Amino acid sequence: MARQLRAEQTRATILGAAADLFDRHGYESTSLSEIVAHAGVTKGALYFHFAAKEDLAQAIMEMQFRTFRRLVKDLDGRGYSSLEALMRLTFDMARVYEEGPVLRAGTRLATAGVPVRPPLPHPFTEWRETATSLLLNAVRQSDIHPDIDVDSVAHTLVSSVVGTCVVGGTIEPAGRQPRRLAEMWYIRIRGMVPVPRRARYLTLAALLERETVTV
């Protein structure tokens, strides 16, 4: 049992080091030797868990996938409207993006074209499908205009959230991210939410911004 625990800890250490380096330097610019040195392990320990750099990338994207699914599940059963759940999900993703390198590294791997092995879905596909489902429910709940192009909105929403995290994280302080995300939602709410319900969601965007900053 102790040996298994040490093996799991070593694997987690290697993945954390790889995620940090992939996030900071990119997949192609990071070597296995650099990951070994950053993790403080031997090459034998790395190869015991991962046969190649591609396996590390896959494991990080799997962790990213599980994190996203956990965030979605955490919102279930809380009585939120579908639009509120979608808004909260984007702020939760932004928070996790800033808290550690895994989501940042996974996003960078996804944008760099690193292959995702089946049956794991591409993260952007998973995120877009989730957004589409919530937006369709929001239309049924009359929180979104009925004539809206849901597929288009889901696609541009995911693109906006990813872009906000990536661009903002590159050129602005981390603490600026919630403000940028709220600004994105202010624009979208004014364009797709009927006037009688608009104030509720504009207020919610401001609230989520404050909550994310203080986390």
Image: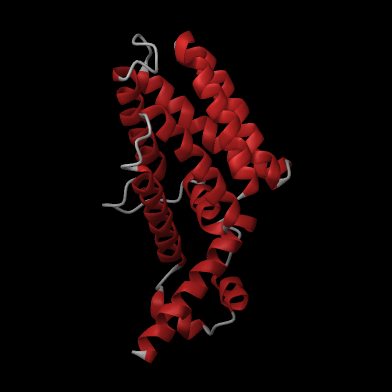
Disc tally is 0
Q: Quadrant of residue 202?
A: top right
182, 61: nearer the viewer? 182
Residue visible at 54% across and 71% down in the picture: 32
Would you say residue 129 is visible in this rendering?
yes
16, 197: nearer the viewer? 197
Q: Is residue 5 above or below residue 170?
A: below
Residue 154: % across, % down: 41, 26
Q: Quadrant of residue 155?
A: top left
Q: Quadrant of residue 209?
A: top right
In the displayed structure, does residue 45 sit left or right of residue 135?
Answer: right
- Outermost residue toward the left? 119
For the N terminus, the image quarter is bottom left
Residue visible at 58% across and 55% down in the picture: 99
Q: Is residue 214 above or below residue 147?
A: below
Residue visible at 29% across and 19% down in the picture: 140
Residue 206: % across, % down: 60, 30
Residue 145: % across, % down: 39, 11
Q: Is residue 38 above or below residue 75?
A: below
In the displayed structure, does residue 164 sit left or right of residue 15?
Answer: right
171, 138: nearer the viewer? 138
Would you say residue 122 is visible in this rendering?
no
Residue visible at 56% across and 29% down in the picture: 205
The coloring applied to the image is secondary structure
In the displayed structure, does residue 59 sit left or right of residue 137?
Answer: right
In the displayed structure, does residue 142 sit left or right of residue 187?
Answer: left
Residue 151: % across, % down: 36, 22
167, 118: nearer the viewer? 167
